Image (cartoon, helix red, strand yellow):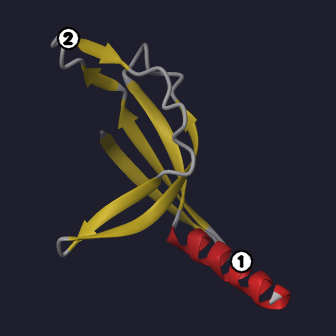
Amino acid sequence: GVISSDYHEFSDSDYIVCTVDTNTYEIRQLGKKRISSFGGLSGNGLWAIINGKPLLIGVAIAQDLSGYNTIGKGTIWFHGPKSIYAALQSWEQKRNLVN
């Protein structure tokens, strides 16, 4: 799970950096297992629950799990809401030019 997160905002974009615990537990063996990769994570959403409703606040873009085997932590970067909205606006503008 997420241990901590930092928000970084720039004039035209933003991103969220999450420190994550790479320890997981095998249900069948009831033992501790470290995750060495979140392969296929890119493009997945980072969600917040606000007043009982899910809100998309990030889209995964990169991972660094180099510390997974030594400290049991890794880092995942997400495009933030500002970057997501800017990309959607750009896509919508391009779509309107084509139609």
Q: Is residue 20 above or below residue 87?
A: above
Point out residue 34 in the picture as x, y percentages from the top left corner: 36, 17
Q: Nearer the viewer, residue 36 or 91?
A: 91
Residue at (50% x, 25% y) in the render: 37
Q: Determine the secondary structure under disc 1.
A: helix
Query: What residue would you read off at disc 1?
Result: 91
Tell me the quarter of the image containing the C terminus.
bottom right
CB-based contact (under 8 Å), mark 1 and mark 2 = no
Q: Nearer the viewer, mark 1 or mark 2?
A: 1
Q: Nearer the viewer, residue 8 or 91?
A: 91
Residue 28: quadrant of the picture: top left
In the figure, is residue 35 to the left or right of 9?
A: left
Point out residue 85 in the picture as x, y percentages from the top left corner: 58, 77
The mark total stands at 2
Query: What residue would you read off at disc 2?
Result: 31
Q: Please, what is the three-letter code of the amino acid marked with disc 1? A: Trp
Point out residue 35 in the picture as x, y percentages from the top left corner: 40, 22
In the figure, is residue 38 to the left or right of 3?
A: right
Q: Nearer the viewer, residue 85 or 66?
A: 85
Tell me the quarter of the image containing the N terminus.
top left
Crowdedness of circle 1 by 10 Å Cα count: few (<14), some, many (20+)?
A: few
Q: Is residue 14 above or below residue 39?
A: below
Q: Earlier in the sequence, mark 1 or mark 2?
A: 2
View extreme (right): residue: 98
Crowdedness of circle 2 by 10 Å Cα count: few (<14), some, many (20+)?
A: few
Q: Is residue 45 above or below residue 39?
A: below
In the figure, is residue 48 to the left or right of 97?
A: left
Q: Please, what is the three-letter code of the amino acid marked with disc 2? A: Gly
> How much space separates mark 1 and mark 2, taking CA atoms?
46 Å
Q: Determine the secondary structure under disc 2.
A: loop
In the figure, is residue 25 to the left or right of 66?
A: left
Residue at (48% x, 61% y) in the render: 58
